[in-house]
Amino acid sequence: MSDIIKARGLSTFVARDCLSACTIVFLGGKERYVLATARLGFHQPAFRGMTSSERRGTIAQEVQRLQRFGLSKAFAERANNATPSGMWYPDKDELLREHVVTRVIPPNAADKPAAAK
């Protein structure tokens, strides 16, 4: 899904929570917006029956994938440090600094009517 979003030059927007695989879809956006009250949550991949070796390999692949979205290696590694049953929620400053999001929208901005032309 993130490849389709990226290929079409679409923007992505999170109003509440975008957790786990949702973050990969979100990262496909050319412009990536979140409401100030929204959260992005990251954790390492897990699949039933994975061996420790397979888990390490899959985590390494996820780190590389996040870097292909333009995120730093340090951020990608930290995003994959949270256990599969846990979640890491970076703060908005870090999301902006790491170019995970393009813009944080103030909470009441979405409620205001568009200006007349």
Image (cartoon, grey):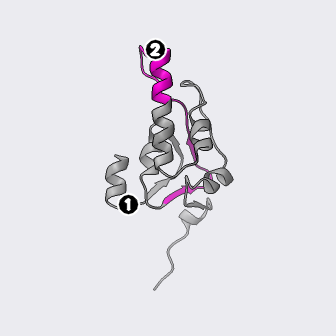
* Observer able to see residue 20: no
Residue kind at label 1, given as amino acid type: Leu
* Observer able to see residue 24: yes
Which residue appears at 41% of the width and 52% of the height?
28
Q: Residue furthest bottom?
A: 117
Which residue appears at 65% of the width and 52% of the height?
92
- Is 65 above or below relative to 36? above
Question: In what element is the residue under mark 1?
Answer: loop
Which residue appears at 42% of the width and 21% of the height?
47
For label 2, count other residues whose C-alpha is less than 10 Å away and answer few (under 14), some (14-19) or many (20+).
few
- Is 103 above or below relative to 74? below
- Residue identifier under label 2: 51
Q: Which mark is residue 10?
A: 1
For the image, the number of numbered tags is 2
Q: Please state which of the two labelled residues, at mark 2 or mark 1, is closer to the viewer.
A: 2
- Is 7 above or below relative to 16? below
Q: The magenta stretch spans which residues? A: 32-59
Q: Position of residue 16 (x, y in %)?
A: 54, 47
Question: In what element is the residue under mark 2?
Answer: loop
Q: Residue 88, located in which quarter of the rendered image? A: top right
Residue 60: in magenta span: no
Q: Position of residue 87 (x, y in %)?
A: 59, 32
Q: Position of residue 102 (x, y in %)?
A: 55, 60
For label 1, count other residues whose C-alpha is less than 10 Å away and answer few (under 14), some (14-19) or many (20+).
some
Which residue appears at 46% of the width and 48% of the height?
68
The quarter in which the C terminus is drawn is bottom left
Nearest to N terminus: mark 2 or mark 1: 1
- Is 49 above or below relative to 55? above
Residue kind at label 2, given as amino acid type: Thr
Spatial separation of the CA atoms under disc 2 and disc 1 = 37 Å
Q: Position of residue 99 (x, y in %)?
A: 57, 56
